[in-house]
């Protein structure tokens, strides 16, 4: 194992853990030995760990990730990480200690990002552009990959097409609107009135206030709908699609209902689950490097304030992303 760990420093780290599903009070900060990377793995000194809705849902025991970890508690949550490689395991040839990296790690069963040090598979991480600080980079992987895969793999969005993106100012949404604009699509986004200017600054062509306007009365003949809300919003949005349009819905809990409703209308709808993909991350990093995509951070929290971060996350009205600054215990 090659390492740059300072042998004079502590051999223990702080990390978030919970030993049962429940409310925010199950989140604890513990001290454990710094792990060592196995073959094909790297050890990362974490700067930023992004928070995602799946984090609080899993903590409550909801969804598919919770089913995978329920027999393996206690567990350290978090899938989004950015930091500095400090040690590499055998057979790692693409990375070296000192590299600045980011990735969606340990998905869905291992997690581990809410920590001062995290283990990642070498093929899960990409190099962070110099333009991006490492705390901010921690906000990027899962949300950006979700947006990228939904738009370009599932919906197959093309230049000139018209797309509606629900919750355009949120974590996945603010990446999705920028990717769609960069691809040359005409972008309509739903948001609260308070986020209208934010989305206009990103270049969105039309912003619809979901509190006052019914999208089914405002939009028609769309090529793509990206549904980041699910439920009745997803079903109602089917009526905005053109004959050959497609709706991609992200929340897994209502996906089957929306797909069934689409079939009854003779329309296409798909659910999807994000997956790690370092090649997609590299493409996204290039857009950031070129200044075409920006990462918006609403707030950062030290590890010790993880419960406060989850409270804000659960509220569901975050503009952009929340991040844990793991350099602070």
Image (cartoon, rainbow, N blue to C red):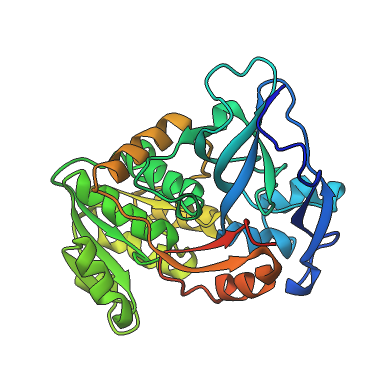
Place of residue 47 in the rendered image (x, y in percent of width and height, measured from the top left): 57, 51
What residue is rendered at 75% in x and 61% in y? 61
What residue is rendered at 62% in x and 56% in y? 327
Place of residue 192 in the rendered image (x, y in percent of width and height, measured from the top left): 34, 79
Q: Can residue 271 be seen in this view?
A: no
Place of residue 124 in the rendered image (x, y in percent of width and height, measured from the top left): 56, 32
Place of residue 13 in the rendered image (x, y in percent of width and height, measured from the top left): 77, 50
Looking at the rendering, which quadrant does residue 253 occupy? bottom right
What residue is rendered at 76% in x and 55% in y? 14
In front of the other: 321 or 132: 132
In front of the other: 201 or 65: 201
Against 2, is 180 above or below?
below
Quadrant occupied by the N terminus? top right
Among all residues in the image, which is located at the extreme bottom? 212
Among all residues in the image, which is located at the extreme left? 160
Among all residues in the image, which is located at the extreme front? 8
In front of the other: 272 or 146: 146
What residue is rendered at 66% in x and 22% in y? 40
């Amino acid at each position: 194992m090659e390492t740059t760990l300072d042998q004079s420093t502590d051999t223990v780290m702080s990390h978030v853990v919970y030993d049962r599903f429940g409310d925010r009070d199950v989140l604890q900060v513990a001290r454990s030995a710094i792990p060592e990377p196995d073959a094909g793995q790297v050890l990362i000194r974490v700067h930023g760990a992004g928070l995602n809705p799946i984090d609080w849902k899993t903590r409550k025991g909801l969804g598919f990730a919770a089913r995978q970890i329920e027999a393996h508690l206690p567990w350290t949550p978090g899938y989004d990480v950015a930091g500095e490689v400090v040690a590499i395991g055998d057979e790692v040839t693409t990375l070296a200690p000192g590299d600045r990296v980011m990735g969606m790690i340990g998905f869905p069963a291992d997690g581990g990002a809410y920590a001062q040090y995290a283990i990642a598979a070498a093929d899960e991480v990409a190099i962070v552009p110099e333009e991006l600080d490492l705390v901010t980079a921690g906000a990027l992987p899962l949300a950006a990959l979700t947006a990228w895969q939904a738009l370009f793999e599932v919906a197959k969005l093309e230049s000139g097409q018209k797309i509606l993106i629900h919750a355009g100012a949120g974590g996945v949404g603010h990446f999705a609107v920028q990717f769609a604009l960069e691809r040359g699509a005409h972008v309509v986004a739903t948001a609260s009135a308070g986020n209208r200017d934010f989305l206009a600054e990103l270049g969105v062509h039309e912003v619809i206030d979901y509190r006052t306007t019914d999208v089914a009365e405002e939009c028609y003949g769309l090529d793509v709908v990206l549904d980041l809300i699910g439920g009745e919003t997803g079903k109602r949005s089917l009526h905005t699609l053109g004959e050959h349009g497609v709706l991609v819905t992200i929340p897994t809990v209502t996906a089957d209902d929306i797909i069934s409703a689409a079939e009854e209308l003779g329309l296409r709808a798909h659910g999807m689950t994000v997956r790690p993909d370092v090649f997609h991350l590299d493409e996204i990093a290039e857009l950031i490097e070129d200044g075409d995509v920006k990462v918006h951070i609403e707030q950062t929290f030290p590890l010790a304030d993880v419960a406060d971060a989850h409270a804000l996350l659960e509220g569901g009205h975050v503009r952009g992303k929340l991040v844990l600054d793991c350099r602070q215990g």
